[in-house]
Every structure is written in C-alpha cells, then in structure tokens.
C-alpha cells in the first residue's frame, strides 16, 4: 500500500470477500488485518463487530527469517530482505 492510499482501502476488498462468508458463519479469521486502528474501527462499522483480535509478538530477526522462508515459495516480489526490512520501519 502506498503512502497516499487511505488505510481503509483494503476494507473494500475484505467486504467483497467476507460477505458470502457472513451468510454461512458468523466467525472467520482474517490474517494480517487490521494493521492500524482506523482499519479495525471501519471494519467493525462496515462488516461486523470484531469479537477478538490475535496479536503475535516476535523479534525482527524471527520475522525476517520466517518471511524470507515464505519468499522461497510465495511468488511475492516483496518477500525479499530489503523489502521486508522496510516494512519493519
């Protein structure tokens, strides 16, 4: 996401993807979202109230190691050391 992209823009994608799931089950897990509090508040207002948030704490060394390993098979251009370290800042 670029610096000029509103942080709630990913919410539109989540809305589109989650609406069918909401008709089947009242619970689902969204990995890596929200990244900021305004995203969480918009999600609660626009999709459904959150019941819980899981937060995992890890050192940058551990995260770097895991993301570099993921990069071996993910096909993502940004799963490289330079891009990963920029995400930490």
Image: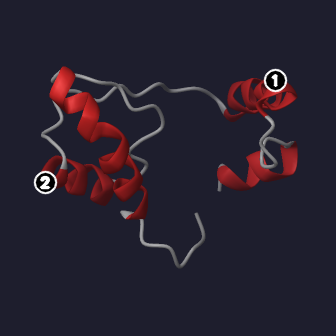
- In the rendered structure, the answer to whether residue 89 lies left or right of residue 70 reads left
Q: Residues within 10 Å of mark 2 (few under 14, many from 20)?
A: few
Camera-side residue: 29 or 13?
13
- Disc assigned to residue 81: none
Location of residue 39 by image quarter: bottom left
Residue 37 locus on image (x, y percent): 30, 54
Question: Viewer-nearest of labels 1 and 2?
Answer: 2
Work out how far the residue at label 1 is from the one at label 2, CA to CA, in angstroms: 36 Å
Q: Residue 23: give x, y in percent of width and height.
A: 16, 29
**Residue at 81% across, 32% down:** 71
Circle 2: element type: helix
Q: Nearer the viewer, residue 36 or 59?
A: 36
Measuring 46% from the left and 31% from the top, which residue is drawn there? 31
- Quadrant of the image containing the N terminus: bottom right
Which image quarter: residue 11?
A: bottom left
Q: How many marks?
A: 2
Q: At x 77% / y 42%, what residue is drawn?
A: 76
Q: Is residue 46 above or below residue 21?
A: below
Q: Is residue 4 left or right of residue 13?
A: right
Label 1–label 2 contact, CB within 8 A: no
> Which labelled disc corresponds to residue 69?
1
Mark 2 lies on residue: 45
Which quarter of the rendering shows the C terminus?
bottom right
Name the quadrant containing residue 20: top left
- Residue at 17%, 47% (x, y): give it: 44
Residue lying at the far bottom in this picture: please name it.
Answer: 4
Which of 58 and 19 lies nearest the eye of the viewer?
19
Residue 21: x percent and y percent?
Answer: 27, 29
Q: Is residue 69 left or right of residue 18?
A: right
């Amino acid at each position: 996401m670029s610096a000029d992209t509103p942080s709630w823009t990913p919410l539109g994608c989540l809305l589109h993807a989650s609406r069918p799931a909401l008709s089947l089950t009242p619970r689902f897990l969204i990995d890596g979202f929200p990244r900021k509090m305004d995203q969480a508040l918009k999600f609660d207002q626009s999709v459904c109230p959150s019941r819980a948030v899981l937060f995992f704490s890890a050192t940058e060394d551990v995260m770097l190691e895991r993301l570099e390993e993921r990069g071996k098979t993910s096909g993502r251009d940004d799963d490289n050391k330079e891009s990963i370290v920029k995400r930490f800042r």
